[in-house]
Amino acid sequence: MTVFGAFLSAEEHRPLDLVAQAVRAEQVGFEALWISDHYHPWTGAQGQAPFVWSVLGAIAAKTSTVRCTTAVTAPIVRIHPAVLAQAAATTAAMFEGRFSLGVGTGEALNEHILGDAWPTLDVRLEMLEESVEVMRALWSGELVRHRGRHYTVDTARLYTLPDSPPPVLVSGFGPKATELAARIGDGYVNVDPSAELVSLYRSSGGKGIVQGGVKVCWSTDEAAARRTVHELWGLQAVPGEAMQVLPSPVHFEQISELVTEDMAVDAVGAVGNRVEDFVEAVRPYVDAGFDEVYISQIGHEQDGWFDFFERELKPALADL
């Protein structure tokens, strides 16, 4: 049975609004949450990027059943994995078993801010593997001394720990990252409904849950929804590696000027208020073998979206 979750966009919303959305998502029957982890929004139009660990603490205190995963944190450059290990341990202790750490190799947009060189993908994958090793060592509660290729930890120990370490779910959009997820992860994350990559994850030894995410824009005014998608997430239609290598929201604004409204709408799952369109947006993930699908409502019509999910979409998704 596929689990359906709400994807909270920290690029679009202020911290207290994200907390309110988490509470509402739990109330209307979402079983789980994704929340993005950014230093910058993708574009100035999105307009927000709160520190996710502060927001997660508030969500933990305000909810009681819904699970939460970062989608995703990059523990490689901007924040040392020893510091993220402490952040994740404290967050997991507050969620009391409802928190998972989603990790990936990140984007220059968020990771370049301290002036470090942006590594190639192969190096970032090496860094990700070592960072997960460091975090798991610290979650043991033992004194850690680590001198690796990319990170050094000098006699560090975490004293505040959850009852059990948080599961680590690894994001992968290509074969190398997917194979890494199978080797070191407790689960796999991908926003592309690729049956081929899910199969690769499984055939490479991956036994954890597979999570996917899709963006939609519910509104009773379809024309307004189309404009919202184009304004806030036109960059979804940008192909290739630009999302990983461009360092500034200004650069994403520049390339987004090449994206038409039709291109932007075609790059998201569903727009408008026809329940069948939203079911069809989710279906490819279910058919590809994803265990959990997280749905992100673009824009500020959040109250209407949650009402729509509770009243119409949730019953329709039960048929999947």
Image (spheres, grey):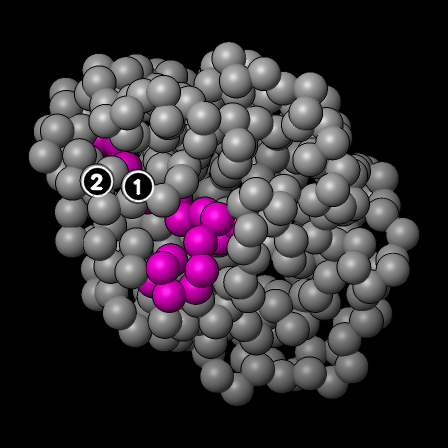
User: Label 1: how many residues lie within 10 Å, few (<14), some (14-19) or many (20+)?
Assistant: some
Can you identify the residue that label 1 sits on?
A: 301
Q: In terms of secondary structure, where does tag 1 sit?
A: loop
Residue 99, horizontal then vertical, whole percent: 39, 60
Q: Quadrant of residue 115?
A: bottom right
290 or 142, which lies in front? Answer: 290
Residue 248, horizontal then vertical, whole percent: 75, 46
Q: In terms of secondary structure, where does tag 2 sit?
A: helix
Label of residue 304 in the image: 2
In this rendering, the answer to whether 223 lies above or below 85 is: above
| Mark 2 → mark 1, Cα distance in angstroms | 6 Å
In this rendering, the answer to whether 139 lies above or below 18 is: below
Read off the magenta span: 1-19
Query: Disc 1 marks which amino acid?
Result: Glu
Task: Specify whether residue 199 is in view.
Answer: no
> What is the tally of numbered marks visible in this picture?
2
In this rendering, the answer to whether 53 lies above or below 283 is: below
Residue 152, horizontal then vertical, whole percent: 81, 71
Q: Quadrant of residue 96?
A: bottom left
Q: Is residue 184 magenta?
A: no
Left or right: residue 85 compared with residue 319: right
Left or right: residue 151 compared with residue 238: right
Task: Specify whether residue 38 is in view.
Answer: yes
Q: Marks 1 and 2: in contact by CB < 8 Å?
A: yes
Residue 128, horizontal then vertical, whole percent: 70, 51
